[in-house]
Amino acid sequence: MMNSRRSFDEAFTLIEVMVALFIFSVAVIALLAIRTNALRLDERARDEMEMTVLANRKMSEIVGQGFAPVGDVSGGFGKEHKNYQWEEIVTASPLPIIRQVTVHITKKSGKKKIVVSLTSYISGVQ
């Protein structure tokens, strides 16, 4: 009789098991939320990196064309980057031989809109 009583005293009660499962489930839910957030941040970082590369490419094209006229131009990148749009804004500066060039790259994904901007100055004197 003593042996059976000892094993009963050493066992877990239903309440202890339920509390342990509750703690475990809360920890798992927290870890899943952290993982989901990390994936979202990783996607955003990849988008911003791609947009930065596209902005640099577009700025190189503009600088390669020489002294840009004042005005706004916009467009897309074709099938390769169909979710991305570019906008080129050329403004005059106080010095007539200098132009400020700003390139905006925009990505719309559902309700979200991400914009990366790059600004540079070009000279008409060569």
Image (spheres, helix red, strand yellow):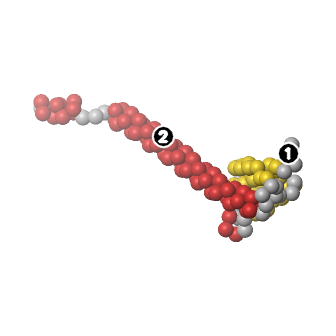
Q: Where is residue 3 in the image (x, y as percent from the top left)?
A: 12, 33
Spatial CA span between label 1 and label 2 = 57 Å
Residue at 74 percent of width and 62 percent of height? 64
Q: Is residue 51 left or right of residue 91?
A: left
- Nearer-the-camera pick, 34 or 29: 34
Residue 29 in view:
no
Residue at 53 percent of width and 46 percent of height? 38
Q: In this view, does 74 lie to the left or right of 108?
A: right
- SS for callout 1: loop
Q: What residue type is labelled 2?
A: Ala
- Nearer-the-camera pick, 39 or 121: 121
Q: What residue type is labelled 1?
A: Leu
Q: Where is residue 100 in the image (x, y as percent from the top left)?
A: 80, 49
Near mark 2 (Cα within 10 A), the count class, few <14, some 14-19 or many ≥20, is: few
Rendered view: 8 above or below 50: above
- Nearer-the-camera pick, 108 or 2: 108
User: Which quadrant of the rendered structure holds the C terminus?
Assistant: bottom right
> Mark 1 or mark 2, which is nearer to you?
1
Residue at 77 percent of width and 53 percent of height? 122
Q: Position of residue 8 (x, y in %)?
A: 21, 33
Earlier sequence position, callout 1 versus callout 2: 2
Instruction: Please report contact status of discs 1 and 2: CB closer than 8 Å, yes or no.
Output: no
- Nearer-the-camera pick, 5 or 83: 83
Q: How many labels does the image show?
A: 2
Residue 94 in view:
yes
Q: Which residue position is annotated with label 2?
A: 30
Q: Which residue position is annotated with label 1?
A: 95
